[in-house]
Each structure stands twice: as C-alpha cells, then as structure tokens.
Image: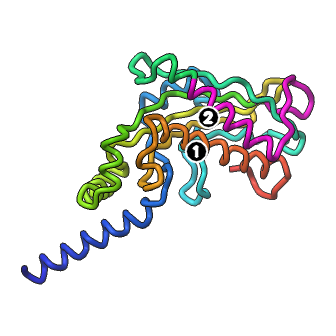
C-alpha cells in the first residue's frame, strides 16, 4: 500500500472511530426537518406564529429546537403553573402509525411531559392567572427496524458500515424517530408565549439497539420533555438575558 493510501485509510479509520465515540453514546439526536413537516406545522401552530418561526443562531446552546419563536413581550416571571393539554396527532395520510400505536405514543408523550414539568412547576387542570397552557402535537413518528438495527449496532463489521452511513448522512441505519410541534400560551388571554418545531431520530447508543419499534420515538419525547422543562424553568425564574 502506498503512503497516500495508508494516509487515506488512516483518516477514514479515525473518522469512523470519532463517529463511534461521539454518536455511539447518543440515545437520540436532532435531525433536519423536511419541507413537508415545516409546512404542516402551520396547521397546528397557526399561520401567524408559523410565519415567526426561525432557526436558532449558530451560538445557541444544545437542546434548542430546529425552529422556534419566543414572544419578546412575554412576561415570563408571571407564570408558575402549567396546564398540560392532551397531546394530539397531526400527521399526514402517509403515516406508518396505526390508530393503536398513535394513541399509545400520545399517552406516552403526555405522561413524559407531565412527569418532567411536575419537577419544576405546579400542574393544574384549569386556566387562571399565572398559568401557562402547553399544547403539543406529535407531527409524525417513524418506527425503527428492531432486528436489523440490533445487527447494525452490535456486529462489528455492520457497525462500521452504519458509522459510514452516519458520516455521510447524519443518521444511522434502521433507526426511528419523531417530529413534534409545541406552543405555550397564557391560559387566560391565549397569547402565544413561545412555539417550536423539532425532529429527533435514534442515535448510535448500544443501550437502545434492541429496543422495540417505537423506542426511538419515545426517547425523543423524553428528550423534548426534559428540554422544555429546563427552558421554561429558566425563563420563569427570571434568568438574565433574552429567552432563546
């Protein structure tokens, strides 16, 4: 093998190793939104809010949605309670989800949100002063292929191929994921305080290799619940700086 070929092979090996280290421990990862998903989000969020959605700055911290809107006039420190509305399903006719799986994932998402928000806020069932209403929609979910995913994550040769795909496309093979939309409103005036659209897919974690078909979607919901709770807690506690 020539020196140049050895150098190329070494660089390729290093890139694969880096992909295994960086993404190998990720349960889920953020993914690009399709044009169809972005357009569909307007139906749930409303055209006025949809027109205000923007991608975050490159300097934004981790855990920021792909598209978001934060009302510059929102008085966040007024709010200390949350009313979590039932999660709804807003996918197109081409969805993979059966009605049974739709309901199962909607219930799971609602429970994940309520569980996380209850760690920082009082949850209520009625609107009132100081109450934020959280409305969330599951825009769609894609199932993983459990057996093939397990092979791609566990078998060394297959994992190398999976890592090459990750380097080329930003996604592992046979993973699932979900797209969600959310808006936070004043429960009395219905003023939109914030809105977001995001998509997450399965990462390269060996721990999730053998999970069930909709495990990646559930992991995405857990991540969103944690991120939303963290951001709302920061904003309502009056942390200095513009909400972002």
Range drawn in magenta: 104-133
Crowd rating for badge 1 (residues with CA inside 10 Å; few <14, some 14–19, many 20+)? many
Residue at the spot x=39%, y=20% of the render?
94
The label on residue 52 is: 2
Q: Which residue is mark 1?
A: 65
| Disc 1/disc 2 C-alpha distance (Å) | 14 Å
| Residue pictured at 80% horizontal, 39% vertical | 74
Vertical comparison of 209 with 39: above or below: below
At x 84% / y 42%, what residue is drawn? 121
User: What secondary structure is marked by label 1?
Assistant: loop
Q: Residue furthest left?
A: 1
Residue 133's x, y, as percent? 78, 29
Q: In this orientation, which residue lies closer to the viewer: 159 or 54?
A: 159
Where residue 123 sits, quadrant-wise, is top right
Q: Is residue 167 visible?
A: yes
Instruction: In the rendered view, tell whether residue 72 sits above or below residue 103.
Output: below
N-terminal of the two: label 1 or label 2? 2
Q: How is the image coloured?
A: rainbow
Q: Is residue 160 above or below residue 12?
A: above
Q: Does the magenta run of residues contain 200?
A: no
Q: Quadrant of residue 186?
A: top right
Q: Residue at x 83, y 47 (%)?
A: 236
Side of 84 where 14 appears, left or right: left
* Other-residue count near label 2 (Cα within 10 Å), few / some / many at <14 / 14–19 / ≥20: few
Residue in front for this viewpoint, 62 or 110: 110
Q: Percent from the top left, x then y, of residue 192?
A: 74, 30
Q: Position of residue 153 (x, y in %)?
A: 35, 54
The local secondary structure at tag 2 comes to loop
């Amino acid at each position: 093998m020539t020196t140049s070929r050895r150098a190329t092979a070494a660089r390729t090996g290093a890139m694969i190793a880096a992909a295994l280290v960086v993404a190998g421990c990720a349960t889920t990862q953020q993914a690009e939104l399709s044009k169809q998903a972005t357009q569909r989000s307007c139906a749930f969020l409303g055209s006025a809010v949809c027109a205000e959605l923007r991608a975050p700055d490159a300097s934004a911290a981790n855990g920021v949605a792909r598209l978001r809107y934060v009302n510059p006039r929102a008085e966040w420190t007024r709010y200390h309670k949350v009313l979590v509305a039932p999660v709804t399903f807003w996918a197109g006719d081409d969805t993979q989800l059966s009605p049974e799986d739709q309901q199962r994932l909607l219930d799971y998402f609602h429970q994940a949100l309520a569980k996380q928000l209850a760690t920082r806020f009082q949850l209520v069932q009625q609107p009132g002063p100081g109450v934020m209403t959280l409305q969330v929609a599951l825009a769609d979910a894609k199932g993983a292929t459990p057996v093939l995913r397990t092979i791609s994550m566990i078998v060394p040769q297959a994992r190398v191929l999976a890592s090459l795909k990750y380097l080329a496309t930003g996604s592992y093979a046979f993973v699932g994921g979900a797209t969600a939309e959310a808006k936070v409103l004043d429960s009395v005036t219905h003023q939109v305080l914030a809105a977001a659209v995001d998509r997450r897919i399965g990462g390269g974690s060996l721990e999730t290799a053998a999970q069930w078909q909709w495990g990646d979607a559930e992991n995405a919901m857990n991540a969103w619940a944690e991120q939303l709770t963290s951001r709302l807690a920061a904003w309502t506690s009056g942390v200095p700086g513009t909400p972002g």
